[in-house]
Amino acid sequence: MIRTVLTGATGRMGATLQRLVHDAPDLELVGATARGQAAQLGSLGVPAGDDLGRVLDAARAQVVIDFTSAEASVTHARQCAERGVALVIGSTGFTPEARAEVARSAASIPVVLAPNTSVGVNVVIRMAAELARVLGDGYDVEVLEAHHRMKKDAPSGTALKLAEVLAAALGRGQEDLTFARHGQVGARPKKEIGVQTLRGGDVVGEHTVFFYGEGERIELTHRATSRDQFGLGALRAARWVTGRAPGLYDMADVLGFPRAT
Ligand SMILES: NC(=O)C1=CN([C@@H]2O[C@H](COP(=O)(O)OP(=O)(O)OC[C@H]3O[C@@H](n4cnc5c(N)ncnc54)[C@H](OP(=O)(O)O)[C@@H]3O)[C@@H](O)[C@H]2O)C=CC1
Ligand SMILES: O=C(O)C1=N[C@H](C(=O)O)C[C@H](O)C1
């Protein structure tokens, strides 16, 4: 049994993961954390609280699954590194500096950092890169994402990953990404990759890549209708990362895909 700790266990993903770990034959929940609502975790019967370090000291964990926030995940990565515990991070909203801090922790433990743990989305990311390579510069590329009204970061981590992978496939850079348009923006620069955000209701997560050509367009869409696929992918990542060599990995590594970027 893989001894597993969940951070953010009271959250939307945390609640999903509690159920999935409970149902998994090869994973055992040995600890849990939350922030303001940590008192709710008492009924789990495992070490719990608002401090991952203390929970890890009591739990003899092998892996932590972390869906909280980028800020919290940086601290969690440091706490795991200090104790030699493997880590799966699903949190999004990382600044380049926060990501670099996680990479520093990953020098001493294995870390999977994945803005989207659904297998389907990762297949779409791969297909999007392939389409971009085949279609080349003759098509205008736009990424559209939609999420529930409670989501804090924008654009989604998945949309950013798609944009990064598309830019790499087309030989473009960060300077070609445009995150919003308003006012007299002028004609669309040929190399621009637009990333647009919608927020509302209970949308679990939707991403579309548009390739707009002359007289045709191609749309590649993933729609999540439940959080279970994110959770099942995170469990797959937890099994894969436990016992690995230190390093910063992503879902492409977990799924055995060649790295897109
Ligand atoms: N990789 C993927 O496939 C997916 C990624 N996500 C990402 O996962 C993250 C969480 O999403 P979601 O579950 O919807 O968010 P929620 O707001 O529902 O849950 C966040 C959880 O994290 C806890 N938390 C926040 N800050 C801290 C902290 N400093 N220390 C400990 N616990 C903390 C909260 O505790 P409390 O409630 O007590 O404050 C809560 O339990 C987001 O970044 C989201 O974008 C979401 C879905 C899929
Ligand atoms: O916050 C969410 O809900 C989600 N966040 C991830 C992201 O930012 O890409 C993944 C998923 O679409 C749900």
Image (cartoon, rainbow, N blue to C red):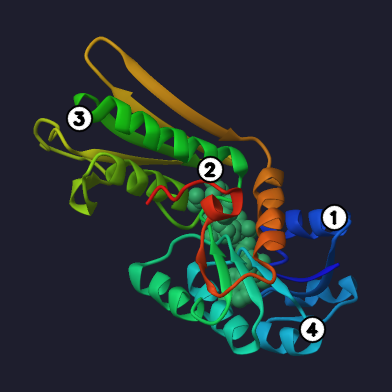
Q: Bin the neighbour count of mark 1 within 10 Å (Cα to Cα): few under 14, some 14-19, many 20 and up.
A: few
Residue 202 can be seen, yes or no: no
Name the secondary structure under disc 1. Answer: loop
Query: Disc 4 designates what residue?
Result: 60
Q: Residue at x 37, y 67 (%)?
A: 95
Question: For disc 1, does the CB lie below 8 Å from ligand 1?
Answer: no
User: Where's residue 230, x and y in %?
Assistant: 64, 48
Query: Disc 2 designates what residue?
Result: 122
* Quadrant of the rendered image containing residue 144: top left
Query: Disc 1 designates what residue?
Result: 24
Say whether disc 4 or disc 1 marks the residue closer to the N-terminus. Answer: 1
Three-letter code, disc 3: Asp
User: Where's residue 223, x and y in %?
Assistant: 57, 33
Q: CA distance from mark 2 to mark 4?
A: 31 Å
Query: Disc 3 designates what residue?
Result: 137
Three-letter code, disc 2: Asn
